[in-house]
Amino acid sequence: MDREERHTPEIVEGYFKLGFLHYAVPEEYGGAGLGSFEGVLFSEELAAADSGTASSLGGNILGLTPILIAGSSELKVVLLPQHTSGPNLASYCLTEPDAGSDVASMRSPATLDGDEYVINGAKRFITNG
Ligand SMILES: Cc1cc2nc3c(=O)[nH]c(=O)nc-3n(C[C@H](O)[C@H](O)[C@H](O)COP(=O)(O)OP(=O)(O)OC[C@H]3O[C@@H](n4cnc5c(N)ncnc54)[C@H](O)[C@@H]3O)c2cc1C
């Protein structure tokens, strides 16, 4: 896929069918439940053959990690099974034109509107974005 510069929904669907799309999400939330060591092995093997797809799948896990680490159990029970039930890709949206390594320079505000947060601003380099 790297040689052809291709990353298609069919590729994502294929990893979903194999059970590897959400490889580091615990089984109770519909993932493969791989630990850190197994996750690294999987990523290394995948990246050796197709680094673009490995970045995409890694970006998916990166996007879900804040929920896995810091989400309430109510949030996990609602959001994670929704995500893992299909060939869905999450994104981790930190980098902005003036905020890469320096995360304290992030400028996009999250404003509460009713029971939703509205995020406005410019992001860049967002894997799966
Ligand atoms: C393939 C790819 C995928 C990416 N996916 C994502 C993603 O999914 N989500 C996301 O949020 N971002 C993503 N990024 C962005 C990536 O995280 C940023 O590029 C990274 O944070 C660096 O930010 P920057 O490019 O603004 O560089 P800068 O932060 O401006 O850094 C430029 C240079 O200055 C150096 N530097 C920076 N700060 C210091 C310091 N305090 N002291 C000394 N040296 C310093 C850096 O090492 C670097 O050499 C992706 C980038 C790539 C290339």
Image (cartoon, helix red, strand yellow):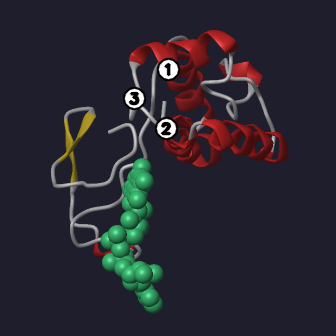
Mark 2 residue type: Ser
Q: In what element is the residue under mark 2?
A: helix
Whichever of labels 3 and 1 marks the residue nearer the N terminus, that label is 3
- Gap in Å between the C-alphas at discs 1 and 2? 9 Å
Of 14 and 61, nearer the camera is 14
Query: How far from the left and from the top, in percent, is residue 24?
Result: 70, 35
Query: How far from the left and from the top, in percent, is residue 79?
Result: 50, 25
Query: How far from the left and from the top, in percent, is residue 51?
Result: 56, 43
Q: Which residue is mark 1?
A: 12
| Quarter of the image that includes the C terminus | top left
Q: Which residue is mark 3?
A: 6
- Rate crowding at label 2 as few (under 14), some (14 to 19) or many (20 or more) other CA atoms within 10 Å: many
Whichever of labels 1 and 2 marks the residue nearer the N terminus, that label is 1
Mark 1 residue type: Val
Query: How far from the left and from the top, in percent, is residue 1?
Result: 49, 30
Q: Which label was assigned to residue 56?
A: 2
Query: Measuring 23% from the left and 73% from the top, which residue is drawn there?
Result: 98
Of 15 and 34, nearer the camera is 15
Whichever of labels 3 and 2 marks the residue nearer the N terminus, that label is 3
